Image (tube, rainbow, N blue to C red):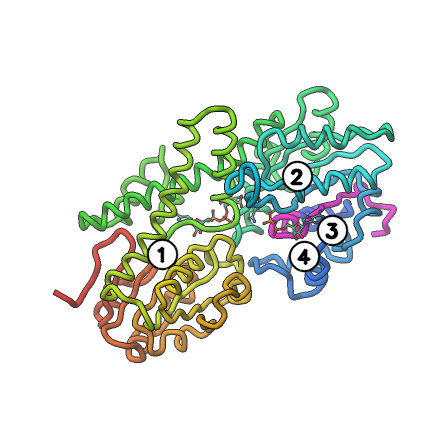
Amino acid sequence: MAASSYTKNILCIGAGYVGGPTMAMIAARCPQYKVTVVDINAERIAAWQSDKLPIFEPGLLNVVKEARGRNLFFTTEMEQNIHDADIIFVSVNTPTKTFGEGAGKTADLQHWEKTARQILKASESDKIIVEKSTLPVKTAQAMERILNSNDKGIVFDVLSNPEFLAEGTAMADLANPDRVLIGSRTNERGIKARQEVVDIYANWIPRERILTSDVWSSELSKLVANAFLAQRISSINAISALCEKTDADVAEVARAVGRDSRIGPKFLNASVGFGGSCFQKDILNLVYICESYGLTEVADYWENVVKINDYQRRRFVGTIRRVLFNTLVGKRIALFGAAFKADTSDTRESPALYVAEQLLEERAAVVLCDPQALANAKHDLARYAERIEFEPDPYRAAQGAHAIALLTEWSQFKVLDYARIFDSMEKPAFVFDGRNILDHQALYEIGFNVYPIGKPKLSHFA
Ligand code: NAD
Ligand code: UGA
C-alpha cells in the first residue's frame, strides 16, 4: 500500500510489552491504517525490526511479520512521526516512583510528561492522544492542560484506553478481548474523538465489547481491575497459610469456592505470590490516591493485598530455611523458573527473583534455571554475579542440589525425569513447589520430601 493511501496515521510512543503487541495487532487487523511505533531505545527498535523480538510472547512474531513493512513500522524518529500522526497512543512505562513525595507508592510520571512535551513541540495540527499506559486518575486532565497550553491554536483531545492484556497470552487477549474500554470527555468534541478510537477496534472486535465512559472512570477502572485480580490471589494465598496449618488442601478449597458462579474459578491458584510489573505498582498507586483524598481505611484495605503478597513470598523462603535444618549456608538450591509467570521472558517483580535474593542473603548457592528469562534475570541480579549460577538445563541445575524450588509454572518443568534428577541430588532431597504444578505423590514415591503451597507436606521423616 502506498503511504498516501492509508486512511489513518496511528503513532504509538513506547515500544514495550504493551506498545509492541498492541500496535502489531492493530496493524495486522487494519491494513488500511499506517501504524508506527516509536521508542527512545534504539536497541529495542532494532530488535522489533528483526526476527529476534525484544520480548518473548507466544504468537507475536507471526502477527508482527504479517504487517511489518506493509503498514507497521518501528523507528526512533520521533518528531516527524508525531507531526504526521492523526492519533497518538502513549504506552511509555509508568513505574512506581522511587524518590521524593509518594516514593514507593505513586506512579513516576516523568516519561509520561516528557512524552506530552515532545508531542506539543512536534505538532502542527489537532490530534487525538490516547493514554495506553496505566496512570493515576486525572492524568488525562493534566496532560490536556500541558498540551492545550500551546500558542499554535492546536487542540488535543486526550482519551483513556487502558490495556488489559496479560503477558504470555497477550496475542489472544488482543485478538479476542473481554472488553475494550475508551474514556473521553462527554462533550460533543470528546465523544467525536472517542468514536475515532472505537472505529479502530471495531475492525475486529464486536461493538458490544467496546465500552465507553468518561475519562476518569476509565482511568480508575484499570487500577481497580488489577487490584481485584491481585486481591483474589492474595485471598487464596492467605487461605493457603491456613491450609498448611490445618491439613486442608488449598486446591480443593479453591475448586469448591470457585464453583460458585458468583465467584468463578479463575485467579484462585495459590502460589509463591504474584509478580509482574503492574499488580503491585497499580495497587500502590490506588492506595496513594485514596490516601491523598483522606480515605485512610480504603487505602489500608487495598494495601493489605500487597502486604499478604509480601508475607506469602517471605513464608515460602521461611519454609525452605526451616525444612533445610535452619541453615542454608553453602547449600545448592536449584530454582526452577525466573519469569514472573510462564510463557514470558519478563522478570519484573518476579517472586523468583525475590526468593533468589533471600536465599543468597542466607548464603545458599543458588542456581537459577528458566527457558526464556535468564538474560533478564542475569541483568536484575547483576550485583550477585559472583554468587549465582544461571543454567538453562534443569538437569544440570539440579545436579548436586539439596533442594529444588519451583517458582514459575513453565510446562517444561512438569515433564522432567524427576527420578533422574533425584539420583543426581544430595540426600535427603527436597522439592518446594511454589506453583503446585508437580505430581507431588509421584515425587514422594521417588524419594523426595515434598512441600507444596497450602497442601499437606509429603515427608519421609517421622
Ligand atoms: P515497557 O517498559 O516494556 O515499555 C515502555 C517503553 O517506553 C520502553 O521501551 C521505553 O524505552 C519507552 N519510552 C519511555 N519514555 C519514552 C519517551 N519519552 N519516548 C519514547 N519512548 C519512551 O512498559 P510496558 O510493560 O509496555 O508498560 C507500558 C504501560 O502499560 C505501563 O503504564 C504499564 O502499567 C501498562 N500496562 C502494562 C501491561 C503489561 O503486561 N506489561 C499490561 C497493561 C498495561
Ligand atoms: C495482569 C492482568 O492480568 C492484566 O489484565 C493486566 O493488563 C496486566 O496485569 C497489567 O496491567 O500489566 P500480567 O501481570 O501480565 O497481567 O499476568 P497475570 O496473568 O495477571 O499474572 C500476574 C501474577 O499473578 C503472576 O505472577 C502469576 O503467576 C500470578 N498468579 C496469577 C497467581 O499467583 N495465581 C493465579 O491464580 C493467577
Q: Which mark is residue 38?
A: 3
Ligand 1 neighbours mark 4 (CB distance < 8 Å): no
Which picture quadrant has residue 49? bottom right
Q: Residue at x 29, y 61 (%)?
A: 320
Circle 1 is placed at which residue position?
435
Foreground tag (2 vs 3): 3
Foreground tag (2 vs 1): 1
Percent across and percent down for residue 66 are: 70, 57
Amino acid found under the numbered disc labelled 2: Tyr
Percent across and percent down for residue 69 are: 77, 58
Amino acid found under the numbered disc labelled 4: Val
Of 50 and 398, the residue lying toward us = 398
Label 2 residue SS: helix
Foreground tag (3 vs 4): 3
Q: Which residues are magenta?
A: 1-22
Circle 4 is placed at which residue position?
64
Q: Residues within 10 Å of mark 1 (few under 14, many from 20)?
A: many
Of 395 and 259, the residue lying toward us = 395
Q: Residues within 10 Å of mark 2 (few under 14, many from 20)?
A: some
Q: Is residue 396 magenta?
A: no
**Earlier residue among tags 1 and 3:** 3
